[in-house]
Image (cartoon, rainbow, N blue to C red):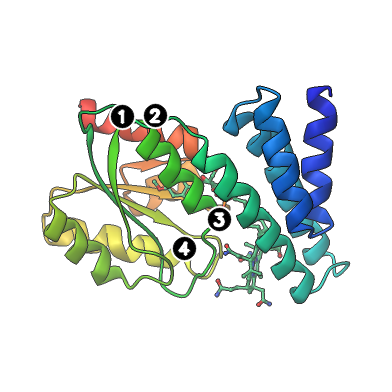
Amino acid sequence: MANEELYKEACEAIVNADRAAAEDVARRALAAGLTPGDIMQNGFVKGIQEVGELFESGEMFLPELMMAADAMAGATEITNAALEVGEQTTKGSVVIGTVQGDVHDIGKAIVIAYLKANGYEVTDLGRDVPAQSFIDKAQEVGAQVIGMSALLTTTMEEQKKVVKMVKEAGLPYKTVVGGAPATQRWADQIGADAYAEDANDGVKKIDALLAK
Ligand code: B1M
């Protein structure tokens, strides 16, 4: 089957909120030789973006949005598991979470899988994480980087809070922000060390920060 057809099927499985179909196409895409990143970015992510647009325009409601998210979670589990295991030596330690008030964690799960596959030790704080917990955990595990995911315009303020706490206390952690409403401009505005557009970019930005 052509790649384009698999991408289309993956996108449709999410829009149709069909977890079994999403898992099935994820497995078939990997078996056909597509990389986890290919099928995720060109298929599943396109689908969940379309779902977001349908929800925003009032053509889809919360229960369907939740089912589409569940289908996305099923696909993500399969593609993340297929990422190659990272280098044996640890490149660094990253503490990551979705900020307080926010439960969106699909993107964060992808970022974690990419970081691990690229040789990072990752501590996942989960979602709805209070600002202080990022700092406490980074101190506990001796992390170099704090990664914060926020998907809501209201919760992105929490990223600002964490960055401010790190700076005011003179702590050594590099801060990285991501999530749909975050931008490079936002990162500059709040004084974060980097903005990551997607999982791949997250790895690149953290590599660059730690190389400095
Ligand atoms: Co919600 N939601 N949602 N939602 N949801 C959005 C974000 C929204 C844009 C939809 C819309 O209206 N178009 C909108 C926000 C509007 C705004 O703030 N301006 C919205 C809303 C309004 C809500 C609720 C308020 C709805 C309600 O209850 N009425 C509610 C809020 C709940 C809360 O958090 N308190 C809500 C709930 C939910 C579900 C629970 C149903 C579900 C989430 C399930 C889950 O995550 N477990 C959900 C979903 C699925 C979405 C959309 C459709 C998809 C999000 C997603 O998974 N994207 C979303 C629409 C959209 O984003 N276009 C939407 C795919 C994912 C791969 O991308 O998360 O961006 P993303 O992650 C990327 C990059 O951003 C980057 O890398 C990732 C991988 O490439 N990245 C990082 C992310 N974090 C990073 C951290 C890093 C580095 C890179 O650190 C190093």
* Residue under the point 70% across and 57% down: 71
Q: CA distance from mark 3 to mark 4?
A: 16 Å
Asked whether the residues under the numbered discs 1 and 2 touch, taking CB atoms below 8 Å apart as contact, a structural biologist would say yes
Going from the N terminus, do you reach mark 4 or mark 1 first? 4
Q: Amino acid at mark 2?
A: Lys
148 vs 47, nearest the viewer: 47
What residue did someone put label 2 on?
Answer: 204
Q: CA distance from mark 1 to mark 2?
A: 5 Å
Mark 4 vs mark 1, foreground winner is 1
Q: CA distance from mark 1 to mark 3?
A: 22 Å
Residue 136 on image: x %, y %? 18, 66
Q: Amino acid at mark 1?
A: Asp
Q: Amino acid at mark 4?
A: Met
Quadrant into which the N terminus falls? top right
Q: Is residue 189 above or below residue 85?
A: below
What residue did someone put label 3 on?
Answer: 106
What residue did someone put label 4 on?
Answer: 156
* Residue under the point 56% across and 49% down: 77
